[in-house]
Amino acid sequence: MSFAKKEYEFLKEIDLSPKNQGCYVAGKWQAHGPLISTVNPANNQPIAEVVEGSMEDYEEGMKACAEASKMWMQMPAPKRGEIVRQIGDALRAKLQHLGRLVSLEMGKILAEGIGEVQEIIDMCDFAVGLSRQLNGSIIPSERKSNLLELFFYSRHSLRCPNHVMLEVWNPLGIVGVITAFNFPCAVLGWNACIALVCGNCVVWKGAPTTPLVLPVEEVLGIASFWFLCDAFWFYCDELVIFIHSKLLISLLPQVGLMVQQSVNQRFGKCLLELSGNNAIIVMDDADIKLAVRSILFAAVGTAGQRCTTCRRLLLHESIYSKILSQLVDLYKQVKIGDPLENGTLLGPLHTKTSKENFLKGMGAIKAQGGKILVGGSAIESDGNFVQPTIVEISPDADVVKEELFAPVLHVMKFKTLREAIEINNSVPQGLSSSIFTQKPENIFTWIGPLGSDCGIVNVNIPTNGAEIGGAFGGEKATGGGREAGSDSWKQYMRRATCTINYGSELPLAQGINFGKHQFCNLLRRGRFVHSMAGTAQGKMGNENDLCCISLYSYEL
């Protein structure tokens, strides 16, 4: 059997075939579930077939992960980092082909497809360095003895109690990752690279509409610490229940809430990165040229299917018309077409359902008083193409509070920075936000406690295109999780606070005295009797004995 089209022949270079197995279990590919076809969203024609996993495949994979984790978590972290480095090198060797696959199956333009794979490579490099820096803390202990009591025990050597507090970080065991179609492999990279160097095995549930991204044997053949379940959507409850340690989600809020509720029933841990309804604020002192370029990329890039896509544009009333007219002209010039062709800026929406949702969204916008300035229609073709759209609308409209996963930009005006911040914070989501301004007072108000309530708070750059070095995630309905850089690695490990007593004394924290005086009095009386008995026999007690008599008499 050959691929449906000649232009798909490059898939052979990454060991994909017209029919592929959807599960990677214990170092081998297998699947015993239904057969599905993956399609090209630019023409809705089949690319290849994938055999989905069965419940038996899932059970076998989980058992293999549980067994592998016993060895993997005991391997030194830098050695785990070496495995992740090899994964990065394998991806680097096939960067162009893998990027082309992402563009073909998801629908984003080629530059973005290659950039997504590069992001996993960067995460591998980041994780390699991190594997030598999974450090705990040494914390000063407050435990101390009474100075008089110390003197009682040894007049010549006053010793502090021998206590130290440590933070120790250990692996969780098995980490489950559920990813969405819009970044079919990068989100895995954010989570799996760090989870692996932290000593965890990984279970990956990819999106059912991008199944070909999973079976890439050159990469996965390096590490037998993965279990890929390509199509366990129908077994989601079971998947959640049996992943014992942690689950990481990059999906719709409704799905994230369902998964979180299931995980919470067993007191499991969740890292949720869900939807965004991101705003760009342009102040009256902004660099207009810089702002317009940024808005175009933020609102049109990936056909509006990024969680960080700019969906709301807030323009100061004094520059409102100037910026809006420039944007309308640029939108009319955006090249729409096959994402694999040079010069294309806007590819298709991912599925036919996405296209239908776009049209429903246009109807809701019109019903709620929105005015379409440019775009607003689907494009007649075999693919899932729509026009990039700009809408004038009130910030109070219900449709503005929702995330329409398409290239639709809601534009509104404001008078003051405080008003703009209130509009920015008025939606349920809290992922990304940005302001364009030159004034320090605007910048520090924006990033301060009374500014944006989002997890990403940018200045003079778009809302999208986050770097891996910072923690990625948001607040409110976005889920509160943090992925990728900074100290996000701590979410993939469990922390233990260890207080170690390497001496012979037992001081308690907070200065608590639990029967200490009674115990000491008994001890002192015993030493007092011993000392007096020695004197009665004409023997001189040692210096500690004499000191004991003096202190005991003093306390009486």
Image (tube, rainbow, N blue to C red):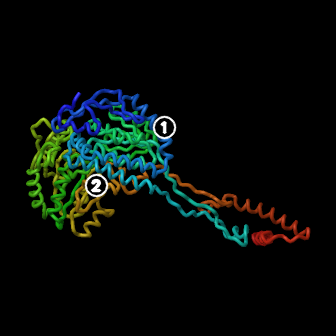
Q: Local crowd at mark 2 within 10 Å, few (<14), some, or many (≥20)?
A: some
Q: Nearer the viewer, mark 2 or mark 1?
A: 1
Position of 245 relative to 474 (above/below): above
Disc 2: which residue: 466
Q: Amino acid at mark 2?
A: Ala
Can residue 556 be seen at all in this image of the molecule? no
Q: Position of residue 527 (x, y in %)?
A: 80, 64
> Left or right: where does residue 516 sit relative to residue 277?
right
At x 47% / y 39%, what residue is drawn?
A: 68
Residue 74, how many percent across, how many down? 51, 46
Callout 1: SS: helix
Relative side of 318 to 20, left or right? left
- With respect to residue 120, does 518 lie above or below? below
Q: Nearer the viewer, residue 223 or 355?
A: 223
Task: Mark 2 and mark 1 in contact? Answer it, CB < 8 Å.
Answer: no
* Residue at the spot 86% in from the left edge and 71% down from the top edge: 540
On the rendered image, what quadrant is the C terminus found in? Answer: bottom right
Q: How many marks?
A: 2
Toward the viewer: 517 or 180?
180
Image quadrant where one finds the N terminus: top left
Q: Position of residue 542 (x, y in %)?
A: 81, 70
Residue holding disc 1: 67
Which amino acid, by three-letter code, is at mark 1? Glu
Left or right: residue 515 versus residue 186 is right
Q: CA distance from mark 2 to mark 1?
A: 36 Å
Task: Decide which of 531, 32 is in the foreground and name it.
Answer: 32
Q: Residue 378 has which mark?
A: none
Q: Position of residue 332 (x, y in %)?
A: 8, 50
Q: Name which quarter of the figure residue 162 lies in.
A: bottom right
Q: Quadrant of residue 160?
A: bottom right
Q: Residues within 10 Å of mark 1 (few under 14, many from 20)?
A: some
Residue 503 in the image: above or below residue 118: below
